[in-house]
Image (cartoon, rainbow, N blue to C red):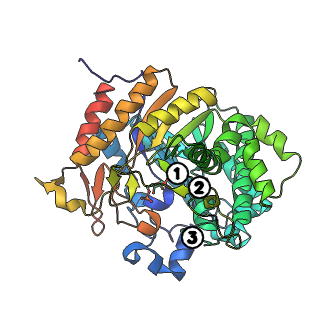
Amino acid sequence: MDLQYKFPEGFWWGSATSATQIEGAANEEGKGKNIWDYWYSIESNRFFENIGPEITSDFYHKYEEDIKLMKEIGHNSFRLSISWSRLIPGGRGNINLEAVKFYNNVIDQLLANDIEPILNLFHFDMPLELQNEGGWENREVVEAYKVYASECFRLFGDRVKTWFTFNEPIVPVEGGYLYNFHYPNVVDFKRAAQVAYNTILAHVKAVESFRTFNIEKGKIGIILNLTPSYPRSQNSADLEAANIADLFFNRSFLDPAVLGQYPQELICILEKYGQLPITQKEDLELIKNNTVDLLGVNYYQPRRVKAKENLPNPYSPFMPEWFFDNYEMPGRKMNPYRGWEIYEKGIYDIMINLKKNYGNIESFVSENGLGVENEERFIKDSYIQDDYRIEFIKEHLKWLHKAIEKECNVKGYHLWTFMDNWSWTNAYKNRYGFVSVDINTKKRTFKKSAYWFKEIANNNGF
Ligand code: BGP
């Protein structure tokens, strides 16, 4: 077949999800509580239509059916996360054998369907007991994570080759310690910096442990939401604003994870404002020696910034926004439901940056997707005709293809997400899946995009 956009041999076609967003069974078979279970129990009003994480898509009971559906639409790979509080209730100590059984079954089912399981160890879901000890602010929790990660490598490493330590580790920093959209709802930059730093420590300790398992063809990486920072203009003040935003939101994780060191400029800013985290001397060696094999890139939207209009109030809490203002570019294309700009070329710019400045590290698009409200509006012939999603994916893939033509080392594309799932405080407001899920009956139905994706996965292009 003559394809205009042909992708490299072995390209990953699939989708991504996370434990808390699909498993449900939040209080079943020995699972401990995580911060989402707890936060919902004390403040359910913070969640769209008061819906919490206890049932979600019920993957815990329906995984067999779901994996069959994945196979049906051409998935050759699927990324999911392990729920730490399910595997090790309380965060440390005994392993929950029911959880081991569940994850073993999921992995085996995926393999039996020729779908490569890609496992992520942490997707925003800190066990409650460990959060009560200070979460990522506490180095003891870093040690507990290392033990948890090692248990996962030991239990599942015979079959799972591709591992990720964290998904979007900056989000719990932003949500939990700066902007109040995750528990524990703290607003304190210095604590946020400690959380970010300790997360990197947890990450490198997991990488270090992973290497000792000598998993055949095993690779380990981190998944980052890389959000390119575009300046309003080429004026030097706008450029500097974009540079600083990039340091805070991208390079704070990208540089240590891939290059093994923090950007000096970022250290200088934090030092100047008295915001540096507490560190130990030996940490630097550890960070340097445990860089990743591959990178997951989550991309939804660009960040546009401009030089500040007004000086920040020096008595207000220190924030990244002391150095830039967000910029609403006239004429930008928007996803009005999520309030995010759609800028397809961003995916190309990210890959070119990885090629130029990060040794062309192997990467893949680990999340990209379009959340839409009230998709039932688009039902025709009893399924959702989501042409807007097909368009969205296609336009991103074209730019990804262009990056590959420029020799960027891109290995795959995963949509967020396989089936409509529970989106944290947005609960079921925006739907992202190839498969719609009736939130009452849990019935699954393919959307039009699922059939379309099957074609491109089977043809390895379009
Ligand atoms: C990413 C997360 C996902 C997912 C997605 C969509 O940041 O890794 O967990 O939820 O964004 O965003 P949202 O659910 O907030 O609409």
Residue at x 51%, y 36% (from the top left corner): 350
Instruction: State the SS at label 1.
Output: strand
From the viewer's perspective, is 387 left or right of 119?
Answer: left
Camera-side residue of 135 and 440: 135
Whether residue 348 is situated above or below residue 105 in the rendered picture: above
Percent x, y of residue 433: 33, 52
Whether residue 186 is situated above or below residue 82 in the rendered picture: below
Q: Quarter of the image holding residue 239?
A: top right
Q: Which mark is residue 324?
A: 2
Residue at x 33%, y 49% (from the top left corner): 333
Camera-side residue of 317 and 58: 317
Residue at x 31%, y 43% (from the top left corner): 392
Question: Looking at the picture, which amino acid does disc 3 mark?
Answer: Asn
Q: Quadrant of the N terminus?
A: top left
Can you tell which of label 1 and label 3 is closer to the viewer? Answer: 1
Residue 279 appears anywhere in the view: yes
Q: Is mark 3 within 8 Å of ligand 1?
A: no
Residue marked by disc 3:
180
Q: Is mark 2 within 8 Å of ligand 1?
A: no
Marks 1/2 in contact by CB < 8 Å: the verdict is yes
From the viewer's perspective, is 282 left or right of 105?
Answer: right
Q: Is mark 1 within 8 Å of ligand 1?
A: no
Q: How far is mark 1 from mark 3, CA to CA? A: 21 Å
Whether residue 399 is situated above or below residue 51 in the rendered picture: above
Question: Looking at the picture, which amino acid does disc 2 mark?
Answer: Phe
